[in-house]
Image (spheres, rainbow, N blue to C red):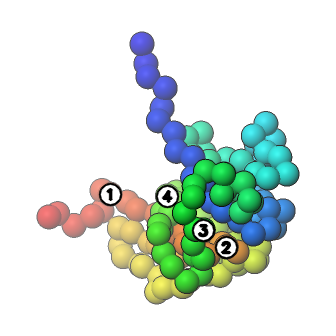
């Protein structure tokens, strides 16, 4: 019997659910209506990864801790694999067009790896990257 693939669901507090939903659609996610309502949007990135965008009120039902302002503090960085350098560029450009901020750090451009960054409207930092493991230097 084959085990089901492991999945990850990233729960993110958002100030404006509609704007955040539009942003995540712009970077390539698809909204899963079955798990979305006026307090949450389930945004499918791949068969095994989804971002659950939660209004602050709904997010607070999961934790008693204060919601961090990701524009001022960092708790996580989300690295997203892409199939090419062009796909890295395309997702950063889509993020900027959708209201995000691009390239908050220098572009990482190595012969075997290429990475950029973007920030969503609520301050979450994403690192799209392409890597050719076969071209990595030994050691």
Residue identifier under label 3? 67
Q: Are marks 4 and 2 in contact (CB under 8 Å)?
A: no
Residue 113 image label? none
Considering the numbered disc 1 on the image, is that residue within a helix, a strand or a loop? helix
User: Along the line of sight, which residue is nearer the eye, 120 or 71?
Assistant: 71
Which label lies toward us, 3 or 4?
Answer: 3
Q: Where is residue 114 shown, x and y percent of the image?
A: 44, 72
Task: Please tell me which residue is depicted at 67% across the width and 73% down the height of the picture.
Answer: 122
Residue identifier under label 2? 122
The tag earlier along the polypeptide, 2 or 3, is 3
Crowding at mark 2 (Cα within 10 Å: few <14, some 14-19, many 20+) = some
Residue 53, by quadrant, is bottom right
Considering the numbered disc 4 on the image, is that residue within a helix, a strand or a loop? strand
The tag earlier along the polypeptide, 1 or 3, is 3
Residue identifier under label 1? 133
Q: Are marks 2 and 3 in contact (CB under 8 Å)?
A: no
> Can residue 26 be seen at all in this image of the molecule?
no
User: Along the line of sight, which residue is nearer the eye, 90 or 2?
Assistant: 2
């Amino acid at each position: 019997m084959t085990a089901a693939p492991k999945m990850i669901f990233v729960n993110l507090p958002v100030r404006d659910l509609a704007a955040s939903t539009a942003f995540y659609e712009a970077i390539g996610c698809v909204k899963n209506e079955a798990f979305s309502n006026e307090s949450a949007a389930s945004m499918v990135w791949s068969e095994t990864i989804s971002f659950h965008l939660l209004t602050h009120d709904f997010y607070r039902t999961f934790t008693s801790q204060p919601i961090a302002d990701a524009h001022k503090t960092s708790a996580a960085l989300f690295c997203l694999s892409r199939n090419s350098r062009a796909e890295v560029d395309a997702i950063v450009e889509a993020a900027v067009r959708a209201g995000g901020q691009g390239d908050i750090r220098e572009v990482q451009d190595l012969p075997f790896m290429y990475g950029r960054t973007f920030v969503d409207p609520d301050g979450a930092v994403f690192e799209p990257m392409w890597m050719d493991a076969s071209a990595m230097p030994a050691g």
